[in-house]
Amino acid sequence: MTKKYQRYVHLLQKVADLEAVQALLGWDQEVNMPEAGAASRARQLATVAGLSHELSTSEELGDLLDALHARGDQLGTAERRNVELSRREYLRQRRYNRDFVERHSRLCSEAYEKWLQGRTTNDSTAYLEVLDRMVQLKREEAELLGYTDHPYDALLDLFEPETTVAELDPLFAEVRKKLVGFVARIREQAPIDQAFMQQKFATDVQWDFSLLLLRGMGYDFAAGRQDLSPHPFTTTFGPGDIRVTTRAEENNFANMCWSSIHEGGHALYEQGLPAKAYGLPLGKAASLGIHESQSRLWENNVGRSKRFWEYWYLRLQEHFPRQLARISLHQFYRAINRIEPSLIRTESDELHYHFHILIRYEIEKQLIAGSLEVAQLPEVWADRYREYLGLEVPDARRGILQDIHWAYGSFRYFPTYSLGSFYAAQFFHRAQQELPQLERNLAAGSTGTLLVWLREKIHRHGQHYSASDLCQRITGEKLNFQYFMSYAEKKYDEIYFKSL
Amino acid sequence: MTKKYQRYVHLLQKVADLEAVQALLGWDQEVNMPEAGAASRARQLATVAGLSHELSTSEELGDLLDALHARGDQLGTAERRNVELSRREYLRQRRYNRDFVERHSRLCSEAYEKWLQGRTTNDSTAYLEVLDRMVQLKREEAELLGYTDHPYDALLDLFEPETTVAELDPLFAEVRKKLVGFVARIREQAPIDQAFMQQKFATDVQWDFSLLLLRGMGYDFAAGRQDLSPHPFTTTFGPGDIRVTTRAEENNFANMCWSSIHEGGHALYEQGLPAKAYGLPLGKAASLGIHESQSRLWENNVGRSKRFWEYWYLRLQEHFPRQLARISLHQFYRAINRIEPSLIRTESDELHYHFHILIRYEIEKQLIAGSLEVAQLPEVWADRYREYLGLEVPDARRGILQDIHWAYGSFRYFPTYSLGSFYAAQFFHRAQQELPQLERNLAAGSTGTLLVWLREKIHRHGQHYSASDLCQRITGEKLNFQYFMSYAEKKYDEIYFKSL
């Protein structure tokens, strides 16, 4: 049995090696690759993806998993959990036939190209045409994978295991019910002045400050690095090499600062996963929602809190004396928490954000179910933005062409962003209860208490618990939107109503 | 037949994809990787190397190559050449059994570690112990691969096909006979003053200048980039992505300048290989010797010529007015061509360089033949440095620990460096004859004429001709050391004897 288990570990770690290689190919493409390298890079990615798929669906692995599954009683708890999750993933992977994988890969390349092209020309016609075929393919994928209630569940299960439309629908209904009214009340208030945020902030000084922030959060630069890329992301090449990227805009200080904190949150999770479980489920993040909970907890609950900036604002002023000397911490704090609807999801404040997700969730669910056709998409998109954000969508670039997800064939990804925020609020609330010194520490620039807590409660477990069980273990209850709502009410009441 | 050939191309290109992936893993390791990433990186490299070896020794590929070989009359010249070279390589690869490959890989990792350790402690004891086992393994490899006359031939054939000890021995005998005396005469002359070269040259300005140089040479930055690494190298991730690295030393201007030119020469060769033959022998460099001829032609025949600096020295002075304003082109030209023995191969002038190679060639040949044991190595090394360079080796770091090659299991690599210089002199002599405007163009900062000639004569052919046949086609004769000797005599007579 031990021998079989070791062989299983060996095979999974080979797959993990190839996944790390794909991650490196992707990272390099975003960060370093010269433009003429694109064609070769696409070949290399396809070749490695093919080999990886082959390894992860091999007969040998299937036989091993069956044998280990059948004699699960001879395994320890951790080993059994690894085997069960690997087997579930194996059986899912085996449902994909080669023909589907190849058609999917080709369609993604085509859709990505049309998406890029659409962004350049600000015309979505060609993109919509290929997106229509993508939706057909995704419907096919849902049938291939199987589902009980809603075809969207099949896809959702990939990123957020065990989460279904039956759970998401009431959750987003609650978001609609509670958040819409609260945000509407805020919008009636006088807007907060944040003109000073749009001064020129030299990007190399922003860069130095972002490195300080990452160090301050506890990100280990001996096991990672930060680089620039058009779209910030975090990527893992193994337990000792977890990298983040960020982006710089001279006229928008907020961009680099909070994207570094956000990616830093993701990276701290990855750096806290157990290295000894490399390649195994227990060495991987519990779910995308939990991953996002880590980035958003740092970005918002910590990184947009007054406590945090009580320490950091002085350092920021030292970096930008000319721009910030006359701006008080109070002004700064209010400015970085200004609530204002925007057309672009990634530029949204932390409340309107969930309307962006809500819109996408409703749309993609209906697309997969067949109750909405791609041709109706621009109109529905515009209607919803009018309804939830009170904004007119002026063009495709600021409409459906703003996100890359669907072009990559990622239908099911968006809800995990909101789940992340909601988990974050619930976790942070718990941390505040369990760590009476937390606020004081944050105000003194020390985030170590929090990081140790996150490591202990979340990071070190990998996929030992499902997202839902993890939440139950940590907070004593399932995901509960009310924690986010209370966090939002407390914070924005003070910012918008009490400080008037 | 066409179908079989296409399938063969398909398989070779898969192998090429994996080779590119290995190159990226290696490049990133040198340029970007945080230190804690080393263990994962070693795993990834081993996994991809294993898959690559599996693909390149598959039964399917063997059967295809046999079938294509048997009906070679149905193939065009280029196709036939591809098949013949691939088959030769395939049969060689198949001689390696899995056990040998794994032992080799493990020993390389161990030797590399001991080498690094030895460099830190300046103690070669542990390195010599593992090197002894490495030499045993290399003797085993030579037997595995087979040879006619000398076991070293088996290894040499990997890098410089069809070149044997029977050819190298007389060549290096000639080097000894002609170069030793000439260099001795130079050493009797008053040393050239180059103190100004050791001023402080800001590394970011050096960097800007090196980019200018690369652009000036015709290096295409849309299909490549330059980065910093401890040991400069050139690497290829596909026809549109060929990267160089360089290194910066504030107190040694020469370091970055000529390493950028050197790597630029390698990269121009790679950028000139036919993209349509990606993954096939005709898309690859003819040999390591020919590759090195390109880097050295640019580094020395062009990059240390007076003509070249007639254009570039003004630009250099603009970059470093404080350091160079009072230094004439004449002084500069003499300083960058100062002949002086040094203990370190990579810091050597272009004449003493070949003594460094001669010493290594003699030693590794005898190690493989068994007529020299590793235990004798430090003593023999010291003796030869005394004999050829008139220098005492003060410690291991400046002795046998200076090169990484043997620790990587590369025995046979060194001679290709000298071959490169000798080919370079012969090619450049031919270019001067065929391009009457060459000197004038160089003096005007235009290297395009030369690049077009190199593309036409060398680059575009890939491995269509062997190194030896290529030399014959271009210059009308086989490799002839006399071209290098004449180049050296003409240049250094003028520098050391006529200008007195």
Image: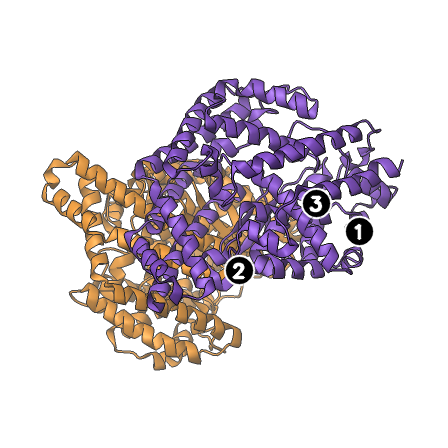
Chain colours: A orange, B purple
- At x 69%, y 31%, the residue is B177
The residue that label 3 is drawn on is: B483
* CB-based contact (under 8 Å), mark 1 and mark 2: no
In the image: residue A284, left or right of residue A150: right
**Can residue B340 be spotted in the picture?**
no
Residue type, numbered disc 1: Arg
State which mark lies toward you, 1 or 3. 3
Q: CA distance from mark 3 to mark 2?
A: 34 Å
Q: What's the mark number on residue B307?
A: 1
State which mark lies toward you, 1 or 2. 1
Image coords of residue B345 (percent x, y): 63, 32
Same subunit under labels 3 and 2? Answer: yes
Q: CA distance from mark 1 to mark 2?
A: 31 Å
Residue type, numbered disc 3: Tyr
Classify mark 2: residues with Cα within 10 Å, few (<14), some (14-19) or many (20+).
many
Above-or-below relation of B364 to A293: above
Dot 1: element: helix
Earlier in the chain: of badge 1 and badge 3, it is 1
Image coords of residue A129 (percent x, y): 38, 79
Image coords of residue A425 (percent x, y): 36, 51
Q: CA distance from mark 1 to mark 3?
A: 19 Å
The residue that label 2 is drawn on is: B240
Q: Chain of mark 1?
A: B
Earlier in the chain: of badge 1 and badge 2, it is 2
Image coords of residue B179 (percent x, y): 71, 33
Residue type, numbered disc 2: Gly
Corner quadrant of residue B146:
top left
* CB-based contact (under 8 Å), mark 3 and mark 2: no
